Image: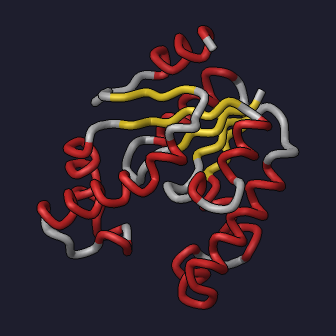
């Protein structure tokens, strides 16, 4: 069994991924942390040294490696499904779950952690809302290819996800 969690930053992929993995007795991989460990550099360093294109190539390679693993839950980076054939690879090798809370929830979560996220650092609430909405529009065609989509959940619980997986 392999489950990929996709969605915008702040949607809860890593938190849900850890809980799901624990409940299902599977391994958990945070794709960004995996990339950092495999490349011996932080994501910001990869971006600074190789630009977004270099980072996306590292991300693609990491996903290709992980696609061969078994029995795990993967929390992807927010942009991972949107490049190369990453979404198709994930759908082919596991179940994909798009966690899609409303923009207002993402704004609230990201405002609390914006100093940790370079892409949104220093943005006002209005700027952040506009930024998220614009990015979600661009990413929606990729995210919507997920085998399961979970919308409008403020406090998504593991049991909610497990019930949906059972129906799949």
Q: Is residue 14 left or right of residue 123?
A: right
For image coordinates 78% across by 64% down, the residue present is 61
48 and 95: which is toward the camera: 95
Look at 49% across and 55% down and name the residue there.
78
Q: Position of residue 156 (x, y in %)?
A: 38, 26
Q: Residue at x 20, y 44 (%)?
A: 104
Is residue 14 in view?
A: no
The image position of residue 150, as x and y in percent, is 43, 27
| Residue sitting at x 52%, y 59% | 79
Tell me if residue 5 comes above or below residue 124 in the rendering: above
Quarter holding the C terminus is top right
For the N terminus, the image quarter is: top right
Pick the front one: 68 or 45: 68
On the picture, is 26 further left or further right than 18? right
Expressed as whole percent of the image width and height from the top left, the position of residue 97 reads 56, 32
Q: Percent from the top left, x then y, of residue 130?
A: 21, 61
């Amino acid at each position: 069994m392999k489950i990929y969690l996709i969605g915008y930053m702040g949607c809860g992929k890593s938190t849900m991924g850890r809980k799901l993995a624990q409940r299902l007795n599977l391994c958990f991989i945070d794709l960004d942390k995996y990339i950092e460990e495999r490349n011996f550099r932080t994501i910001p360093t990869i971006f600074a040294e190789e630009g977004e294109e270099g980072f996306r190539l590292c991300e693609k390679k990491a996903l290709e490696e992980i696609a061969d693993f078994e029995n795990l839950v993967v929390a992807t980076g927010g942009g991972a499904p949107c490049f190369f054939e990453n979404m198709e690879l994930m759908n082919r090798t596991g179940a994909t779950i798009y966690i899609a809370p409303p923009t207002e929830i993402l704004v609230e979560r990201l405002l609390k952690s914006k100093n940790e996220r370079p892409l949104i650092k220093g943005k006002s609430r209005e700027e952040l809302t506009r930024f998220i909405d614009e990015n979600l529009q661009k990413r929606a065609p990729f995210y919507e290819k997920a085998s399961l989509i979970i919308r409008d959940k403020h406090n998504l619980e593991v049991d909610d996800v497990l019930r949906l997986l059972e129906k799949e």
